[in-house]
Image: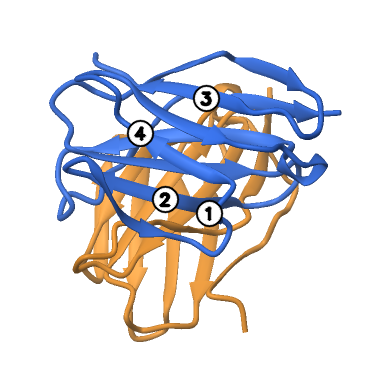
Amino acid sequence: EPEVTQTPSHQVTQMGQEVILRCVPISNHLYFYWYRQILGQKVEFLVSFYNNEISEKSEIFDDQFSVERPDGSNFTLKIRSTKLEDSAMYFCASSYGLLSYEQYFGPGTRLTVT
Amino acid sequence: QKEVEQDPGPLSVPEGAIVSLNCTYSNSAFQYFMWYRQYSRKGPELLMYTYSSGNKEDGRFTAQVDKSSKYISLFIRDSQPSDSATYLCALNYGGSQGNLIFGKGTKLSVKP
């Protein structure tokens, strides 16, 4: 069964450093998402991406964040200058179409900012 | 008032019990309702998806939506220890908004 994959599973970085989190969505899916989950809190939407552009973003997704689909398979989330409060699990998700609200999540990348 | 409310539990039941998990929401504009299961330090796994009031059944799982009461439920029959996980409700407004609004999750423990 096809699945969303994410790398790395755990990333440790120092405050102020740039990090790139990588995702490979399900191959025939067209919509891609990033969510985050701070420990003990709810899963929160960050951004959605379709046709090589952002279709929606939350208040969390400020200028420090960017997303990119550098090739036909990868989808990345970049945090330019990490802060302690960026420590969280970051989940990538994909869905076949916007009107298909069934989103399939990857296993997550645990980001620890020290 | 929060958009989606979900009792975080924890909820502990004996093996074989029927489990009832619930979420309430405040905005009647929500159109799509999902239940995800999340094991510790893993990604959410889609269990059920529905968009209309009423019941939808899949094996031991039944999702129920009552739009008039803004109340959704997930029932698990014949619960198993492997069902021990956190269950998240997730709602969507539909239209061009693809983002999911999650509840905080209910942690379920099924004891053998």
The one nearer the camera, A46 or B17, is A46
Say which label, 3 or 2, has the lower sequence index: 3
| Res. A61 mark | 1
Q: Which chain does the residue under circle 4 lie in?
A: A
Q: Which colour is chain A painted?
A: blue
- Cα separation between marks 2 and 4: 11 Å
- Cα separation between marks 2 and 1: 7 Å
Mark 2 and mark 1 residues within 8 Å of each other at the beta carbon = yes
Which residue is situated farthest in the right direction here?
Answer: A114
The one nearer the camera, A24 or A15, is A15
Q: Which chain does the residue under circle 3 lie in?
A: A
Residue located 36% across and 52% down the image? B34
Label 4 crowd (10 A; few <14 / some 14-19 / many >=20): some
Quadrant in which the C terminus of chain A appears:
top right
- Cα separation between marks 4 and 1: 14 Å
Label 2 crowd (10 A; few <14 / some 14-19 / many >=20): many
- Cα separation between marks 3 and 1: 15 Å
Residue located 49% across and 51% down the image? A46
| Res. A21 mark | 3
Placement of A110 over or under B14, stated as above or below? above
Residue type pointed to by label 1: Phe
> Which is in the foreground here, disc 3 or disc 4?
4
Question: Residue beneath label 4, please?
Answer: A68
User: Can I make out residue A107 in this image?
Assistant: no
